[in-house]
Image: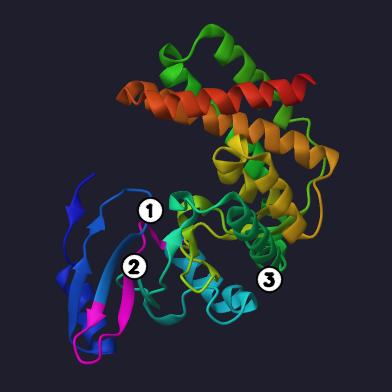
């Protein structure tokens, strides 16, 4: 992945027509499946913004819809504010929010529980936001079957990096996704919450990066945290769902187990390919926990 230090010239020209003269503070990593984001400052008054270019029209539409119809439900300061969009450039300008991503926080355990409680509350607000359209409501349940199919294809390409027992356990859980019952639907964030949730110096929590937002089973939004901080600190999961306002039903718990295992297996294969022992150990711990919880 390479870094692009400045937005494409037409995008920068559009952004400066909208905001005024700009200086780029940080370039964007050019990833094929995610929006490229440049951190810019307005030279006239020091105002800070993000210029984002979506990877495709679908992502641009999702992010624009999210900002216009769902993000306002989160309240002032809880998400970036949309300032302008350009369909021609697949670009958006949003306000920059200060804060440390959740996955980089190392405060005391009591503070982490507060952060996760607030994360649960914030996600509940998002899941209840925006009005469902008939098409979105109809298509949402297909996310689970699609993810199971993708997991099978992915394991076919990285199977040599997983043991036979690991492959067997993961595929068994992928198969179980097909038998999960009806799941609660909502307007989900759909991205990596660990990097999208920002904890500020004044003890506030904000959520950004809405390019994957859509109507889907809400359990999908819990997978990133289940593969991360909840593994070593189960109390954080308890705090999150206290803030969320409800616990998971039986089918949701099963779906979360399956989805967590699929995500951990993918990350484990990637970590082993890169020789990242620490990341591989963390993924193995997730798979062991899921296997224990399902077997128990």
Residue 23, given in percent of the width and then of the height, sits at: 17, 77
Mark 2 or mark 3, which is nearer the start of the sequence? 2
Q: Which residue is mark 1?
A: 34
Residue at left 34%, top 22%? 273
Using the image as rendered, state which of residue 121 and residue 270 is in the foreground.
121
**Residue 212 is at least partly visible in this image:** yes
Which quadrant would residue 101 be assigned to in this image?
Answer: bottom left
* Magenta stretch encompasses residue 50: yes
From the viewer's side, name the closer residue of 157 and 36. Answer: 36
Judging from the image, what secondary structure is the residue with disc 1 in?
A: loop
Q: Secondary structure at mark 2?
A: strand
The number of numbered badges drawn on the structure is 3
Q: Is residue 10 left or right of residue 54?
A: left
Question: Residue farthest to the top?
Answer: 164
Q: Which label number is shown at residue 129? A: 3
Which stretch appears magenta?
41-58
Report if the CB atoms under discs 1 and 3 are less than 8 Å apart: no
Q: Residue at x 57, y 58 (%)?
A: 189
Say which residue label 2 marks. Answer: 52
- Quadrant location of the N terminus? top left
Q: Earlier in the sequence, mark 2 or mark 1?
A: 1
Q: CA distance from mark 3 to mark 2?
A: 23 Å
Few, some or many C-alpha atoms within 10 Å of disc 1 (few <14, some 14-19, many ≥20)?
Answer: some
Dot 2 crowding, Cα within 10 Å, few <14, some 14–19, many 20+: many
Q: Nearer the viewer, residue 187 or 38?
A: 38
The location of residue 130, given as percent across then percent down, is 67, 72
Q: Position of residue 279 (x, y in %)?
A: 42, 30
**Residue 153 in view here:** no
Query: Residue 61 location, x and y as percent?
Result: 48, 67
- Cα separation, mark 1 vs mark 3, equals 23 Å
Instruction: Inspect the magenta stretch and tell me whether residue 125 lies in it.
Output: no
Q: Crowding at label 3, few (<14), some or many (≥20) Cα neighbours within 10 Å?
A: many
């Amino acid at each position: 992945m390479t870094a692009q230090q400045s937005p494409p010239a037409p995008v920068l020209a559009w952004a400066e027509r909208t905001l005024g003269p700009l200086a780029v503070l940080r370039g964007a990593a050019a990833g094929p499946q995610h929006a490229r984001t440049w951190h810019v400052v307005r030279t006239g008054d020091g105002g800070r913004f993000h210029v984002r270019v979506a990877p495709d029209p679908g992502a641009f539409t999702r992010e624009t819809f999210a900002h216009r119809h769902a993000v306002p439900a989160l309240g002032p300061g809880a998400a970036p504010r949309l300032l302008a969009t350009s369909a021609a450039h697949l670009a958006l300008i949003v306000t920059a929010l200060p804060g440390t991503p959740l996955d980089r926080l190392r405060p005391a355990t009591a503070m982490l529980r507060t952060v996760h409680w607030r994360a649960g509350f914030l996600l509940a607000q998002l899941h209840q936001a925006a009005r469902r359209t008939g098409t979105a409501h109809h298509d949402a349940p297909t996310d689970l079957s699609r993810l199971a199919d993708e997991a099978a294809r992915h394991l076919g390409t990285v199977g040599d990096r997983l043991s036979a027992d690991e492959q067997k356990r993961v595929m068994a859980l992928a198969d179980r996704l097909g038998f999960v019952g009806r799941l609660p639907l909502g307007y989900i964030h759909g991205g990596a919450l660990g990097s999208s949730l920002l904890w500020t110096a004044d003890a506030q929590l904000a959520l950004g990066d809405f390019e994957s937002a859509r109507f889907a089973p809400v359990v999908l939004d819990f997978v990133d945290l289940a593969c991360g901080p909840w593994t070593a600190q189960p109390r954080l999961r308890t705090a999150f769902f206290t803030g969320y306002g409800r616990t998971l039903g039986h089918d949701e718990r099963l779906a979360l187990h399956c989805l967590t295992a699929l995500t951990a297996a993918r990350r484990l294969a990637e970590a082993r390919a890169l020789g990242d022992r620490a990341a591989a150990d963390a993924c193995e711990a997730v798979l062991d926990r899921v296997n224990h919880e399902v077997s128990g």
